[in-house]
Image (cartoon, grey):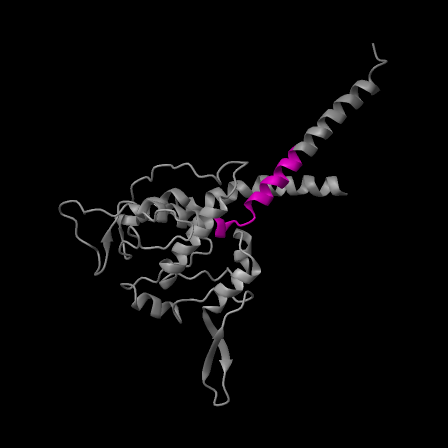
């Protein structure tokens, strides 16, 4: 039974991967420059996340990105997956206020978050988010690295690609900023990162490029936190199939050994 389950899982993974690859292409909207490819440790069949980079990326998200972008699919308890203890996660959660029902007069109240709570949304609704961000609601970042066309390469390029617009450029709306890697080469988000903006507890120099790389790694981890486990399972499946192939070959030779 276990072998059959592994074979079924291998089939599912085999068909799911192409569909996942097609999803970003279907979401493509507007011309933009092609982002240069960068080497990411989590790429490839044996890729794995550098949890130190993931933790630094969370620092960038918490200190910069969370002011505008939510992560509805993440709970604070999920942060244990990047190497934090439950005690550390509890302290992080306790710094955030989440809805806590209503008081005796029926007025809404808040309470300190716990590891079981989802990340706090920075805005009460999409309309408020758009009103505070040049008319465009910032996207939720829970699965951004998977669904954003171009994936991590384009996220990194977008964060570091702000530059002076070419001659003759006219923004399509108030607050639009030129960025060659954004759809239609403009974006409603001004440059979010700068040197020294984030405090890294491990002493890593917080350059703009480092902050962008770390937060991109964090977003990739958030989108697929069980990547390493899937890769281990994939390796086990391949070894199992190889064992079955060798066993079938030896059985064939045994059965047909007397045939001349």
Q: Position of residue 103 (x, y in %)?
A: 49, 86
Q: In the figure, residue 249 lies in which quadrant?
A: top right
Q: Residue furthest front?
A: 203
Q: In the figure, residue 70 lies in which quadrant?
A: bottom left
- Whether residue 146 is visible here, answered yes or no, is no
Q: Position of residue 48 (x, y in %)?
A: 52, 41
| Relative vertical location of residue 72 with respect to residue 151 in this rendering, above or below | below
Q: Of helix, strand and loop, which mostly describes the magenta segment?
A: helix
Query: Residue at (84%, 13%) from the top-left corner?
Result: 259
Of residues 98 and 246, which is closer to you in this image?
A: 98
Quadrant of the snapshot with the N terminus: top right
Q: In the figure, residue 33 lies in which quadrant?
A: top left
Query: Residue at (49%, 66%) from the top-left corner?
Result: 93
Q: Which residues are magenta?
A: 221-238
Query: Residue at (86%, 13%) from the top-left corner?
Result: 258
Q: Position of residue 99 (x, y in %)?
A: 48, 75
Query: Residue at (35%, 67%) from the top-left corner?
Result: 129
Q: Residue furthest right?
A: 258
Q: Is residue 235 magenta?
A: yes
Q: Residue furthest top?
A: 260
């Amino acid at each position: 039974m276990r072998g059959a389950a592994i074979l079924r899982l291998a089939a599912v993974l085999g068909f799911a991967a192409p569909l996942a690859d097609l999803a970003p292409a279907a979401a493509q909207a507007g011309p933009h420059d092609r982002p240069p490819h960068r080497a990411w440790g989590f790429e490839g069949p044996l890729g794995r996340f550098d949890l130190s980079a993931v933790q630094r990326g969370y620092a960038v998200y918490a200190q910069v990105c969370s002011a505008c972008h939510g992560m509805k699919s993440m709970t604070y308890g999920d942060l244990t997956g990047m190497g934090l203890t439950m005690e550390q996660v509890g302290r992080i959660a306790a710094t955030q206020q989440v809805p806590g029902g209503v008081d005796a007069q029926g007025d809404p109240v808040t309470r300190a978050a716990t590891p079981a709570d989802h990340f706090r949304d920075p805005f009460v609704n999409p309309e408020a988010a758009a009103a505070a961000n040049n008319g465009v609601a910032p996207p939720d970042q829970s699965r951004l690295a998977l669904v954003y066309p171009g994936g991590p390469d384009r996220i990194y390029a977008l964060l570091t690609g702000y530059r002076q617009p070419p001659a003759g450029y006219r923004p399509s709306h108030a607050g639009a900023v030129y960025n060659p890697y954004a759809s239609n080469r403009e974006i409603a988000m001004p440059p979010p990162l700068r040197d020294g903006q984030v405090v890294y507890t491990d002493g890593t120099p917080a350059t703009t490029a480092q902050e962008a790389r770390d937060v991109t790694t964090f977003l990739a981890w958030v989108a697929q936190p069980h990547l390493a486990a899937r890769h281990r399972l994939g390796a086990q499946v391949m070894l199992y199939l190889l064992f079955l192939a060798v066993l079938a070959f030896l059985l064939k030779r045994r059965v047909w050994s007397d045939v001349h």
